[in-house]
Amino acid sequence: MTATRTSRAKRIQMKQRIPFSTTLWIILLVWSVLYPAPTRAEQTVFIPKIMVQTTYDDNVLFKDTGDLELRLTPSMKLKYRAEDWELTGGGKAVLFRYEDLTEYDRENYDIWFKGSKELNERFQLKLDASYDYNHTFVEELAQSGTQSTTSLRRRYSMSPGISWNVSEKDRLSITIPLSATRYAGKTNPDSTERGSLVTWSHGLNNQRTALLAQGSYNHYDYDRTNGDTRQDVYNLMGGFSYRPTELLEFVGYGGLGYANSIATVDGGTDKTASDIYPSFDISGTYAREKWKFTLGADRMISPSIYGESTTRARVRASSEYAFTERLTASFEGAFYTLETEGLVAETEKQTFSLRPTIQYKWTKDAVIRLEYKHTSIENRISHNTDQQNRIALRFEYSYPTFF
């Protein structure tokens, strides 16, 4: 009983802290006071955009039924640039409508902001902030390759940072990522993340190679219905970037991480776990006049919907070929693996997807695109496999306006 009351008291104390949205507005207010809008901008760009997509999905939300989906996405972007600082912001709404499965109709919203300020030749301040209102499914499938229920959630994120040009060859960057995810129901646990990221680069004399180092710390809190999960994740990696020609570029990190976790259970026994794991993040790009090829792979611990963080590994490849200035074809392929430590949920999944696309630039600002996407998700514990096929026709139109 004592452990139960203590755990519940901790969760109540967490919920009584200053809301994340309040903290976000305070920092944005401080930013606006420190860096008020100048009387004249060197360039201001406003870009309204509309996207209309109709899709046939043979397995909507992996519910074993097909339907016709209509997706409408109006969006806008505003970019304001002055001599020593820059502000960019925007937002979009995504409306999903189905011909028969109207119970899955929904709307997602996204608002974001980016700002940078050069204090002098050596120091630069940065601030990224965003607010997402979505229904989990599309976002989780894209980020981690996992299927989820359509649970309404709100996500607040902010990343203030500073960059320091220590010398002509050395650069040091510090970022403090903060985020909070709140669900409307009790299907998934609320979570909060805070941490720090330090990156250092040193350019070599050949001006083609740079040595890289990166260290990070992240603390995750999950507020479950029957307890809490707290995880501390440390990661240290080293690597290099190499660009031998204008056509080829490679960036690679590799190192080790350490995760320490505790999951409290109301009326039960707490669970603890610690693990040392290999981590990496590599990418390469090769481009020619008419085509481009990109390959990337990474392995990290990342937040999840399961009440504990997951170990996620991804391999992604993409290519693009321009037949003419107007007509292009592209291909994307991805392979994900996802697993948890089993503190709260036993999860082990494997996802494969491929997406060929053909795109025609009708005018300078109008694009028509036809694409097909296949997704296969295997549960490695139950050995069940879910598959989805989508064929979509998309129309996009933007109207950039310069001031």
Image (cartoon, grey):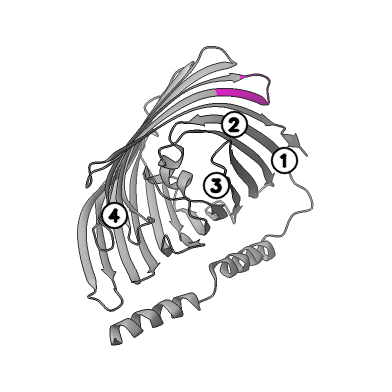
Could you tell me residue 142's position as x and y percent? 43, 42
Q: Distance between the residues labelled 3 and 4?
A: 46 Å
Q: How far apart are marks 4 and 1 (CA)?
A: 40 Å
Name which quarter of the figure residue 25 lies in. Answer: bottom right
Q: Which is more N-terminal, label 1 or label 3?
A: 1
Q: Which is more N-terminal, label 1 or label 4?
A: 1
Mark 2: few/some/many CA within 10 Å (<14, 14-19, 20+): some
Badge nearest the viewer, 2 or 1: 2
Name which quarter of the figure residue 98 lies in. Answer: top right
* Residue at the spot 30% in from the left edge and 56% down from the top edge: 235
Q: Distance between the residues labelled 3 and 1?
A: 36 Å
Residue at which label 4 appears: 236
Badge nearest the viewer, 3 or 4: 3
The residue nearer to you, when weighing 291 against 213, is 291
Q: Which amino acid does label 3 sit on?
A: Glu
Residue at which label 2 appears: 53
Question: What secondary structure is marked by label 3?
Answer: helix
Question: What secondary structure is marked by label 2?
Answer: strand
Mark 4: few/some/many CA within 10 Å (<14, 14-19, 20+): some
Q: What residue range appears in magenta? A: 361-369
Residue at which label 3 appears: 103
Badge nearest the viewer, 4 or 1: 1
Q: Are marks 3 and 1 in contact (CB under 8 Å)?
A: no
Q: In this view, does 368 lie to the left or right of 388?
A: right
Residue 384, visible in the rendered structure = yes
Q: How far apart are marks 2 and 1 (CA)?
A: 23 Å
Q: Do the residues labelled 4 and 2 touch (CB within 8 Å)?
A: no
